[in-house]
Amino acid sequence: MAYRLTMVGTGYLGATTSACMAELGFEVLSLDVDAEKISRLQAGDLPIYEPGLEEILRRNLANGRLRFTTSYEEAAAFGDVHFLCLGTPQKPGEYAADVSYLESAIESLAPYLNRECLIVGKSTVPVGTAQHLADKLARLAPIGSGAELAWNPEFLREGFAVKDTLHPDRIVLGVASDRAEKIMREVYASMLEAGTPMVITDYPTAELVKVAANAFLATKISFINAMAEVCEAAHADVKQLSLALSFDDRIGGKFLNPGLGFGGGCLPKDIRAFMARAGELGADQALTFLREVDAINMRRRARMVDLARELAGGSFQGCTVTVLGAAFKPNSDDIRDSPALDVAVKISQQGGQVTVYDPVAQENARRAHPELSYGASALEAAQGAHVVLLLTEWQEFIDLDPEQLGAAVATRKIVDGRNALDSETWRAAGWHYRALGRP
Ligand code: UDX
């Protein structure tokens, strides 16, 4: 049977999953309470920057497999499988995640569920949320046990969201019945046939896999950044250290790039929510190391500001600083908890005249931080700069010609916040080149 799918929530996860599942041949109806977002998506206008996604969206709108709505009643009548793709942001002033969008999605959808269906949670949640939502669903759905819940965490990376959705490296599925497993095996049949490993488990394990994965990745980044701190103290070179470690295939080189550290909508909030939840469960000691992971990460930003100030001659007063990059990572327009913008704002608060340039995240940055100046290109942003900071490693920054940039700036001083440039080339062009964790 060809199941009909709905997506509840059309943010990063929901928009990507909607378009990709339609691309796989499913009929998809996607819902959001934000009518403006829905009309943009229905018009083929993707509100986020994600390579390759807009074409897939438009193709599947044109062939009629993908549609959008704001009506829960319509979604309930349409769908055999309802995916929950809602955000779980950090609560203001707390570490814990806010799961109220998931709660209200279930409260809005369940009363219309008059036919057998499966609800599949994809959001990143505190462990225990799935069981809580399953209980709520059982109380509210007229079809009773005919509406079931499964938990299927998503691991997609921004910038690679299409590939990660169509060709995931694993499928994790928390289920409470064989029926739910059977339905999901059919939904993911093409991926399973392609050999994608699937781990079938219970709700809490499935929920934990996601936060454990993000905690591990954050720990790996903070590990190498802690080594960078030691290298700075010992006049050693963390880039070479990281390279040497990477040849040990038990360690591997991925997520071992030292620099300004992690940001974005997932890693920072997920490790904090994980600590908060472990505390509620009485297992807080198990995760105290994540506090250190978070602290190491935040110290990199402070260190970057210090290094920039040092190059500025001890103070930012009267100093023009160019910040290359505003997105939390390249190939994204996402500025949530962006280390680059954080550094830009701190320098501006300390009296520096900051000009930012980002090839894609510029408008988002301008909206969030109108107090900063923005340049139309890297070269324009660098006009008259006393210090240049490379804070997001976009390829176009890596490809910058040190001579051309050198002609624009007032003084040839650069801090490579992502260890992305070839230091020899820049020094040979007369630049005072500094990087985090290197002599
Ligand atoms: C992450 C997870 O990778 C993904 O599986 C999950 O579903 C959501 O969270 P994402 O937030 O898109 O994805 O970004 P990711 O590519 O993981 O990068 C996170 C941050 O770590 C970025 O700020 C990046 O610049 C930084 N990073 C990454 C490093 O500082 N060093 C590295 O070696 C790798």
Image: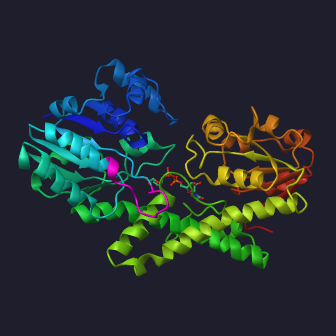
Q: State the image coordinates of residue 336 (x, y, percent, origin top left).
A: 55, 48
Q: How many marks?
A: 0
Seen at 43% across and 23% down, the residue is 44
Task: Tell whether 437 sits left or right of 150.
Answer: right
* Quarter of the image where the C terminus is located: bottom right
Seen at 35% across and 45% down, the residue is 86
Q: State the image coordinates of residue 259 (x, y, percent, origin top left).
A: 67, 61
Is residue 96 in view? yes
Q: Nearer the viewer, residue 352 or 329?
A: 352
Vertical comparison of 360 with 310: above or below:
above
Q: Is residue 99 magenta?
A: yes
Q: Is residue 198 magenta?
A: no
Task: Tell whether 232 sits left or right of 7.
Answer: right
Among the 4 quarters of the image, the one containing residue 25: top left
Q: Give the magenta-colored segment's residue range.
A: 90-101
Q: Residue furthest bottom?
A: 285
Q: Nearer the viewer, residue 245 or 93?
A: 93
Q: Residue furthest front?
A: 93
Q: Nearer the viewer, residue 114 or 260?
A: 114
